[in-house]
Amino acid sequence: NAKTHYIAELRGLEEGENVRLAGWVQRKSELGGIVFIRMRDATGSVQVVLREGNLSEQELTAARGAGIEASIIVEGSLRRDPRAPGGLEVIASKFILVGDSKDFPIKPGVGEEFLLDNRHLHIRTTRMRNALMIRMEVMRATEEWFVNNGFVRVEAPTFVGAAVEGGATLFEVPYFGKKAYLTQSSQFYLEAAIFSFENVYTIQPSFRAEKSRTRRHLTEFWHAEAEMAWADLNGMMDVVESLVKYIVEKVVERASDKLEALGRRMEAIEGRFPRITYDEALELAKRKGAEIEWGEDFGTEVERLISLEFDLPVFVTHYPKKAKAFYHKQDPKRPEVVLCADLLAPEGIGEIVGGGQRIESENELISRIVEEGLNPEDYKWYLDLRRYGSVPHSGFGLGIERTIRWIAGLPHIRDAIPFPRTPVRLYP
Ligand code: ATP
Ligand code: MG
Ligand code: MG
Ligand code: MG
């Protein structure tokens, strides 16, 4: 075995215990002939002290020559020293340079574009590792919530034949002489699966050819989606609220050290999420100076203004029919609006969840498809779902990276995913 312990395990050991560690050089300095290496592995970092007398001349020369991010194996004894960062150090008795690293390009002061071009190296930094560990906890908590609440996981295809969210953001791919598209949402396939399992979910990528460059859009993002037979709009919002609270609670519980290292103060959420209508939100945004007409969907800036008015995530419900996709059910009391809800995260983040009640009648669905200028032929199988035992049902999609961006307090959505895809980035 290359190592006897991970660095995080050292805290539990006795002074003087012998350990063998394997990892990478984070920092290096020399003082009075003694070499100090700050060594990291997946779990943390520790100071290694390399002294003449304890090591051969070759080992010391190798240690002195090791570059930042060189991979190393160190054997030594554990010493408690309040002056060392973390209060621990390892007095080395053996040093092996496994893979040297010359002039590691990720340095303080390099620009944002450079870091993105070198993302494959940038993900080794403490900040990126903390952000990605929070991502892992968000994914885990999301999956857990669904499993704990009896939802059945159903995977949907990536290649699809028709749009869910409108043609403007469709990626077209050649498919054996035909046209196929990359999926924008798994919603329709989940709707098909409610007849088998009633409450279903998936967590998988969605693709959107986003033309505008924003801090909250990727062209490939991870989408947690659910559909629930028999649920109405309020039932859907109750589910979203419970899920989002659970995610925050678990991330705070399991990754508090990572949040703290990122300078983020986040606590579990108490209290119900406020629910306001589109009309109320519109008034609010107008009072804050937004120039927007009734009927338009809210964009990033308007959502920012609205979310800044609340300390908690806020549901905005009953958007105008023309602002939303064709499958939304109209409000029977007010047919110009639909039974939908977006969840806006606080601090100006804006939409992290979009959802609502789906049309359950075949005729109504056909007339909405036609009204949107789409071809009912393209939605033949989707219409079948209204022909054979149709039920009232609702569902939603939660953007994993948007949720991470909010919880971890990241300035840009791209830091919530290891290898971001945007209109201008396909590398690495
Ligand atoms: P927006 O209004 O910000 O463009 P949307 O209303 O088009 O989002 P939905 O179709 O409602 O998005 O998708 C459900 C969720 O998926 C959104 O609430 C958001 O969290 C996430 N999402 C949508 N588009 C993107 C994207 N391009 N990048 C990252 N996440 C996205
Ligand atoms: Mg969009
Ligand atoms: Mg939206
Ligand atoms: Mg939406």
Image (cartoon, rainbow, N blue to C red):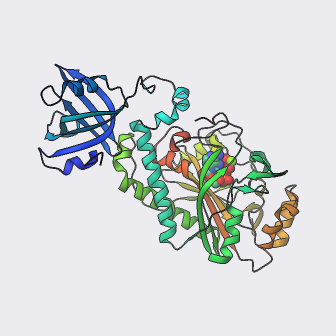
Residue 255 shown left or right of residue 350 in the figure: left
From this viewpoint, is residue 283 visible? no
**In the image, what residue occupies the spot 64% across and 65% down?**
395
Image height of 38 relative to 176, above or below: above
For this rendering, which residue is in front, 96 or 380?
96
The image position of residue 90, as x and y in percent, is 19, 38
**In the image, what residue occupies the spot 69% across and 37% down?**
212
The image position of residue 249, as x and y in percent, is 41, 58
Image height of 23 relative to 251, above or below: above
**In the image, what residue occupies the spot 55% across and 55% down?**
314
**In the image, what residue occupies the spot 60% across and 56% down?**
204
Quarter of the image with the C terminus is top right
From this viewpoint, is residue 428 visible? yes
Image height of 267 relative to 50, above or below: below
Q: Residue furthest top?
A: 32
The image position of residue 161, as x and y in percent, is 79, 57
